Image (tube, rainbow, N blue to C red):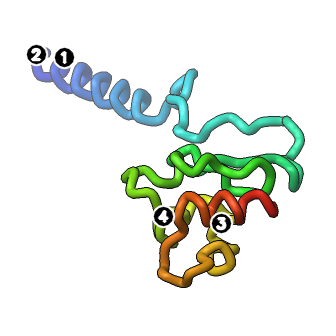
């Protein structure tokens, strides 16, 4: 009789474990996917910002001090990779072709934007 109780208890426990493994949680855990926005897509006149906060499209020129983060008085091509307009026009703005755009070169060039 003792053996029968052990066998029945073991079978009952096994059935309970099997059932617990097959149930779906009522509230699944949240995903890392951010919710989608129903807003309208940006237009060509919108300004997007890169990681350093620089404007990356046309419009108001980026402040030179924002580009010259090392405060050297000039920027190199690598310094302006977040500014689409200046990256595209770097050679034009670099009037003396020294590989750097000084504050005065940038001011003159940016005024023609």
What secondary structure is marked by label 4?
A: strand
CA gap between label 4 and label 1 equals: 84 Å
Residue at 54%, 68% in the rendered image = 101
Provide the residue designation for mark 1.
5
Residue reaching furthest to the bottom: 97
Marks 4 and 3 sit apart, C-alpha to C-alpha, by: 10 Å
Q: Position of residue 69 (x, y in %)?
A: 42, 50
Distance from disc 1 to disc 3, alpha carbons, whole Å, reads: 83 Å
- The residue nearer to you, when weighing 43 against 6, is 43
Q: Residues within 10 Å of mark 3 (few under 14, many from 20)?
A: many
Q: Which element carries disc 3, helix, strand or loop?
A: helix
Residues at circles 4 and 3 in contact by the CB criterion of under 8 Å: yes
For the image, the number of numbered tags is 4
State the residue position of label 3.
Answer: 86
If the image is split into quadrants, where does the N terminus sit? Answer: top left
Circle 2 residue: 2
Foreground residue among 10 and 111: 111
**Which is in the foreground here, disc 1 or disc 3?**
3
- Disc 4 target residue: 75
Q: Is residue 92 left or right of residue 15?
A: right
Mark 2 and mark 1 residues within 8 Å of each other at the beta carbon: yes
- The structure residue drawn at horizontal position 70% and vertical position 62%, both measured from the top left corner, is 108
Q: Quadrant of residue 96?
A: bottom right
Location of the C terminus by quadrant is bottom right
Circle 3 or circle 2, nearest the eye: 3
> What kind of element bears circle 1?
helix
In this view, 84 is above or below 70: below
Q: Where does the image place residue 105, in percent across and percent down from the top left?
A: 61, 66
């Amino acid at each position: 009789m003792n053996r029968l109780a052990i066998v029945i208890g073991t079978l009952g426990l096994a059935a309970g474990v099997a059932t617990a493994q097959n149930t779906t949680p009522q509230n699944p855990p949240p995903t890392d996917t951010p919710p989608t926005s129903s807003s309208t897509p940006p237009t060509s006149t919108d300004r997007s910002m890169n990681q350093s906060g620089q404007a990356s499209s046309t419009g108001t020129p980026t402040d030179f001090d924002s580009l010259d983060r090392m405060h050297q008085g000039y920027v190199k091509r690598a310094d302006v990779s977040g500014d689409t307009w200046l990256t595209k026009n770097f050679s034009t703005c670099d009037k003396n072709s020294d590989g750097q755009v000084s504050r005065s070169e940038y001011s003159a060039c940016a005024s023609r934007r």
